[in-house]
């Protein structure tokens, strides 16, 4: 229990079925790599956003529906990298 007394409110935030999934991609070393991964994952059906943190390799994917991990892994491989988690 961290906070008490305040309810979890999302004022002005649309609660549609958008979800975020964080993956870890190995092998990215520069902005070019980030672009390649962002582009390949961004092509997947249902994906509305991709954010990559180069330092940690964390790739946050925003989508309208749960993504098939295999499909994401294939997209990452297509870009030339490896999905490790
Ligand atoms: Cu690179």
Image (spheres, grey):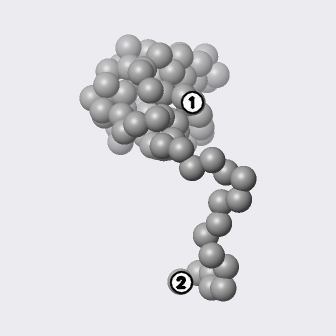
Kindly check if marks 1 and 2 are in contact, taking CB atoms under 8 A apart as contact.
no
Q: Residue 41 at what x, y percent from top left?
A: 46, 22
Tell me how far mark 1 sits from mark 2, CA to CA. Answer: 31 Å
Placement of the C terminus among the 4 image quadrants: top left
State the residue at coordinates (57%, 49%): 15
Element type at mark 2: loop
Foreground residue among 65 and 69 = 65
Q: Residue at the left extreme?
A: 70
Of the numbered discs 1 and 2, the one sitting upstream in the chain is 2
Residue at the image position 36 percent from the left and 34 percent from the top: 67
Residue occupying image coordinates x 40% and y 36%:
65
Q: Which mark is residue 16?
A: none
Tell me: 58 left or right of 4: left
In the image: residue 4, left or right of residue 42: right
Badge 2: residue crowd in 10 Å (few <14, some 14–19, many ≥20): few
Residue 45 to residue 17: above or below: above
The residue at which mark 1 appears reads as: 49
In this rendered view, identify the residue nearer to me: 17 or 70. Answer: 17
Q: Give the residue number, with chain letter if any, for mark 2.
A: 1
Identify which residue is drawn at 72% across, 53% down: 12
């Amino acid at each position: 229990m961290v906070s008490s007394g305040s309810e979890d409110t999302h004022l002005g935030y649309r609660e549609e079925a958008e979800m975020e999934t964080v993956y870890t991609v190995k092998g990215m070393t520069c902005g070019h790599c980030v672009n390649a991964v962002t582009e390949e994952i961004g092509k997947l059906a249902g994906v509305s956003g991709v954010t990559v943190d180069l330092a940690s390799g964390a790739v946050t994917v925003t989508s309208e529906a749960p993504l098939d991990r295999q499909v994401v892994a294939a997209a990452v491989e297509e870009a030339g990298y490896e999905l490790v988690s």
